[in-house]
Image (cartoon, coloured by chain):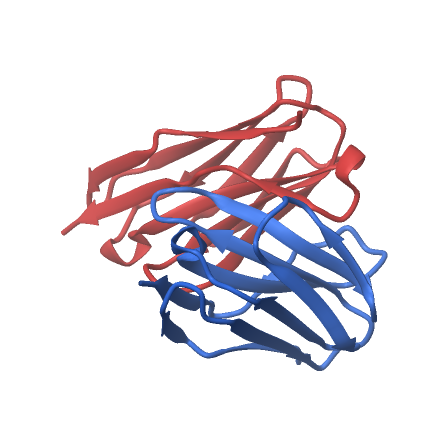
Chain colours: A red, B blue
Amino acid sequence: KQEVTQIPAALSVPEGENLVLNCSFTDSAIYNLQWFRQDPGKGLTSLLLIQSSQREQTSGRLNASLDKSSGRSTLYIAASQPGDSATYLCAALFMEYGNKLVFGAGTILRVKS
Amino acid sequence: SQTIHQWPATLVQPVGSPLSLECTVEGTSNPNLYWYRQAAGRGLQLLFYSVGIGQISSEVPQNLSASRPQDRQFILSSKKLLLSDSGFYLCAWASSGVKETQYFGPGTRLTVL
């Protein structure tokens, strides 16, 4: 069964710190790996999408990497800000599942001012 | 540009009552459509997905059903709600035939009492 796991489940850091969120997936046969942000009581916002042929993607202070062989992805947030506080979800589009994303349980991030 | 709408935003229903949640997408045609449920403290669970009008795939046996009466309309229903149906329901769309990101609606918070 294809699964996605995220660690840590929760993270609290002071403002300005660089941080890394981890995501692992059980099957390297993926089309892509996506990172989403969810604010409390809101829908999901797509942050970064890494195609299976890519190693990383960057958007502003965010950088996501993908290592298919080890089944891992990381989301790096530079110079964290209180506005970054949210739940971060990663999701894999496994080839066996076609059009269906499999989500991790998320990492709840709190950036303290 | 594409937009996705969900309503209602919040709903409180008694056990045994019927349910109808609606999702519509604007600015695209023939999208893949998805219904997810997010229970408190848990990740997103895919409930249904659709690749075309009248084509519905169910992911888990449950008390819910879905329909797609029009190309850009996706409806989640139940004849008799259970307490366990409480949660945050999210609709999403993605371009058909392309392994790209999914775009999520604002969600519906359902509380069954």
Above or below, B8 against A49 in this view is below
Q: Quadrant of the C terminus of chain B?
A: bottom left
Residue B22 at x, y percent in the picture: 58, 76
- Along the viewing direction, whichever of B35 and A39 lies nearer the viewer: B35
- Tell me: B20 left or right of B42: right
> Residue at position x 46%, y 63% from top?
A43
Residue B67 at x, y percent in the picture: 72, 69
- Tell me: B1 left or right of A103: right
Q: Quadrant of the N terminus of chain B?
A: bottom right
> Residue at position x 29%, y 52% from top?
A85
Residue lying furthest top in this view?
A70
- Tell me: B11 left or right of A2: left
> Residue at position x 46%, y 47% from top?
A62
Q: Kindly indicate the quadrant of the structure image that contains residue A98.
A: top right
Above or below, A1 against B96 in this view is above
- Along the viewing direction, whichever of B32 and B69 lies nearer the viewer: B69
> Residue at position x 52%, y 41% from top?
A90
Residue B76 at x, y percent in the picture: 60, 67
Q: How many marks?
A: 0
Residue A42 at x, y percent in the picture: 40, 64
Q: Kindly indicate the quadrant of the structure image that contains residue B61.
A: top right
- Along the viewing direction, whichever of A85 and A104 lies nearer the viewer: A104
Q: Kindly indicate the quadrant of the structure image that contains residue B74.
A: bottom right
